[in-house]
Amino acid sequence: MAEIRSIFGHPIIPGEPCKELVAGLEDLLAKAKDGEITGLAAGWVTRSGGFGTFWDGDAGTPVPLLVSVTALYKRFTNFVIE
């Protein structure tokens, strides 16, 4: 049986959460609770192949958030095609 790995190559046990993903989300949550993060846009994929998006933030965050999402699009696109 082939070993399942995360996008960055970490081994994943089928049916178990990706530990690095959970750690990253927990870090973001802690920063949001401290007021350090004032806007967030996210996209996700579920085990069943579904996907979703979310964004929210303070009144002054739409333009900086758009810049952030645009930078993510470019970086992630380059990551995928390499």
Image: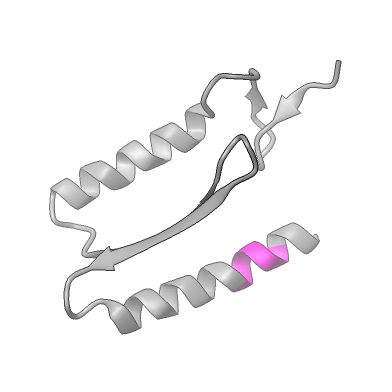
- Residue located 64% across and 24% down the image: 12
Is 60 placed left or right of 12 in the picture? Answer: left
Is 56 placed left or right of 19 in the picture? Answer: left
Q: Quadrant of residue 80?
A: bottom right
Q: Which is more toward the observer, 82 or 12?
A: 12
Position of 76 relative to 23 (above/below): below
Quadrant, the N terminus: top right
Examine the rendering and report whether any part of residue 42 can be seen. Answer: no
Find the residue positioned furthest to the right: 1
User: Which color scheme does this rendered protein use?
Assistant: one colour
Position of 56 relative to 59 (above/below): above
Image position, residue 22 (x, y; %): 42, 33
Image position, residue 46 (x, y; %): 56, 40
- Residue located 15% across and 47% down the image: 33
Position of 8 relative to 42 (above/below): above
Is 64 placed left or right of 76 in the picture? Answer: left
Image position, residue 7 (x, y; %): 66, 42
Image position, residue 54 (x, y; %): 39, 60
Q: So how many labels did they put on this image?
A: 0
Examine the rendering and report whether any part of residue 71 can be seen. Answer: yes
**Secondary structure mostly taken by the magenta-highlighted segment of the chain:** helix
Find the residue positioned furthest to the bottom: 63
- Residue located 80% across and 60% down the image: 82
Is 81 placed left or right of 53 in the picture? Answer: right
Report if residue 76 lies within the magenta region.
yes
The magenta stretch spans which residues?
74-78
